[in-house]
Amino acid sequence: MTPTGRVVLRGGRIVDSRGERRADVAVDDGVVVEVGEQLAGGRVIDATDCVVAPGFVDLHAHLREPGKEEAETIETGSRAGAMGGYTALVAMPNTDPPHDSVAVINFVREQGKRAGLVDVVPSGCITLGRNGEALAPLAELASAGVRIFTDDGNGVQDELLMRRAMEYGTGLGITLAQHCEVATLTKGAVMNECQCCTSLGLPGWPSIAEELMVFRDIELARLTGARVHFLHLSTARSVELVRAAKRDGLPITAEVTPHHLALDETRLATFDTVYKVNPPLRSPADIAALRAGVIDGTIDAIATDHAPHPRRDKELSLDQAPFGMLGLETALGVALGVLQVDLTHLVRVMSINPARIAGIADRHGRDIDTGAPANLVVFDPTVAWQVAPDSLASKSRNTPYVGMTLRGKVRHTMFNGTFTVLDGAAQR
Amino acid sequence: MKHLRSIDELGHDGLVRLLNLTQHMVEVNRRPIPKVPALRGRTVVSLFFEDSTRTRLSFETAAKRLSADTMTFSVSTSSVNKGESLRDTVETITDMGVDAFVVRHKSTGTPWQISEWTTASVVNAGDGWHQHPTQALVDCFTVREALGVERFDGLTLTIVGDIKHSRVARSNISAFSMLGAKVVLVAPPTLLPPDVAHWPVEVSHRLDDVLARTDILYMLRLQSERMTQGHVPNLREYAELFGLDAKRVAKLPTRAVVMHPGPMNRGVEMLVDPSSLPNSLIHQQVSNGVAVRMAVLFDLLAGESSAANLQQVTT
């Protein structure tokens, strides 16, 4: 991308790992060149009343390309990410074909570069075809730059295979990210197993289907020394298990989605398929435990599980409709609305920690100092706004937040020194 | 009333209204020519995504006796298998000009989804494990008629079998409770829903313990696939513990009635010939099915002129 010359972000509050301070930020040629009071020269962009922070990093985005371009492409997903303040997205591997070969990894990365709106960071499959039967070529994928591996959409069911993946992975310095779901316990299930599902006659999805695998992988990590990341945790007991594992010093990290922090199981009583997600929306007690887990650091990251689906796929009966909802463009507003955290902690869970977990901390989630790559977000943490489906950058419309008032909106996003979003508008 | 989707939505007053209306329809059905012009010009479409013989036939017969036009849409002949969304299907049929959808689907909630996408009335003819309101109306009407009572205060309804996967049980628990009955559920724990403790019912795992205080014994069908899913070890063991045999019939109070929504699994939940039972209501359940569905369609579709129309029906 062509550098646009010196730009000064004026009047904002810088928030990074060291806390908050008031300063202007000057950017030139893709990097931060000056941080200080009343900086002059170049193009001045207003950041008054706004937070200037390292750009957000999403550990969990389904960009659907290759294979389901009707739902999203790497370009439209990247644009949705930029609108949400993201400068890097970890692309989930459940595409068609999946991320189990270097060819697909390179394709995804190239499409990301072509779009040029965020860093598209491909994850790799743990098993071939995400079938849970044989390991994907982990070393070959790792040498092509993949740092985080997952079969997301599926949990790796076989204990021996998961143990082997962890053992093999410790030699490669990679992170294994687990979608925790014991599949035999969730067959046909669409909503949390609870009082509500009993009355609705909807097949229940028990918490233990997640917790058994969280427990298993914690113990396998203890045995093998592997670095394990838990995707989209949804239950109180999962949070407790991770808290105890961290107390034991195990190299475990975990994420939670904005929707599991904000929406409870009763939403599905409307029979609106937009609320059908995997794992399912849980109880108010689970939500409280997840929020507490984010606040006390047990949960390292907020990750969107952005899962676009075309209208016709969601306009099916509850048993046939696919799992998933959009997340990239609403994550900040939802997180600020439901979490009582200071902005430093918010930036930690939306940018600093996920950048570290994804293995991209050299260019994302960095403190805003001279020399740092200019991957930045500027957001107003107090402004209220409503989600208008037609204004979403995503190709899909399956958001549950239509008509809801969110607090906190992205004003500018800068990727490698270029504005991808300026004054709330996508630049390309 | 715009839709009939669940007993809870219908409420006590609606339930009583439909039961009273059913009485009029029974009288219509006794005439030499059991057909009235009440719904002439109205169109009722049966939208069945799951196999059903008796429910679909009884809805279609009911519509025809009220002179409505009927259409049938069943999944095997539809474009649903060609990637058309449920919404597209519903909108297409709505565009043809229909007044009511009668819907059966294996997934909970489809009648609610469909009512978002059409201006027509929606009747739930069974959604997943959730609701089957017209079956509950049939069962309440049959008991009212057989026992000669309007309310069920002081009566105990015992439902036996696969409660967990039963829309009939869920609708009947609501309907019989609304009319004052006490409800007892009898099943192995694997065939009860996980949070049954929150329901206003008594739960037992031993049929023999509750027979003596049962006024209405309601046997549910056990589907054979429940065995492969590990809910019960085998049918013989189930029949032994929960089947109705002659010894158990003898334990019932003499005035107790026996019901079953059909189709029956002889040799599993029903170990006696039902025609040998002194107080079986199983045939009445089938024959009342048409009158109940006439009452429902009339109530939904006769609209503004329903009072005048009712007179026309009953005189």
Image: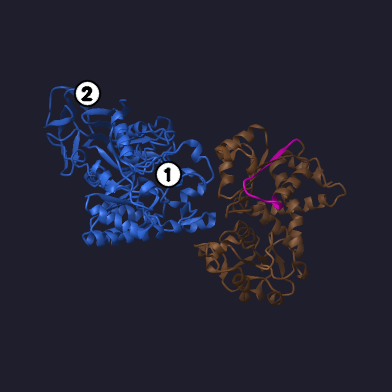
Chain A appears in which tint? blue
Does any portion of residue A24 appear in the rendered image? yes
Q: Which residue is label 2 attached to?
A: A2
Write the start and end of the magenta stretch as one range: B41-55
Does any portion of residue B156 appear in the rendered image? no
Q: Residues within 10 Å of mark 1 (few under 14, many from 20)?
A: many
Residue A77 rendering spot, x and y as whole percentages: 35, 34
Q: Secondary structure at mark 2?
A: loop
Residue B38: say if magenta: no
* A28 sits to left or right of B50: left
* B314 sits to left or right of A127: right
Pointers 2 and 1 in contact (CB under 8 A)? no
Q: Are marks 2 and 1 on the same chain?
A: yes
Chain B appears in which tint? brown
In percent of the image, x 22 and y 50: which residue is there? A172
* Label 2 to label 1: alpha-carbon separation: 36 Å
Q: Residues within 10 Å of mark 2 (few under 14, many from 20)?
A: few
Amino acid tagged 1: Gly
Residue B95 rendering spot, x and y as whole percentages: 64, 32
Q: Which residue is label 1 attached to?
A: A324
Residue A105 rendering spot, x and y as whole percentages: 31, 39
Q: Kindly indicate the quadrant of the structure image that contains residue A328.
A: top left
Q: Chain of mark 1?
A: A
* B194 sits to left or right of A158: right
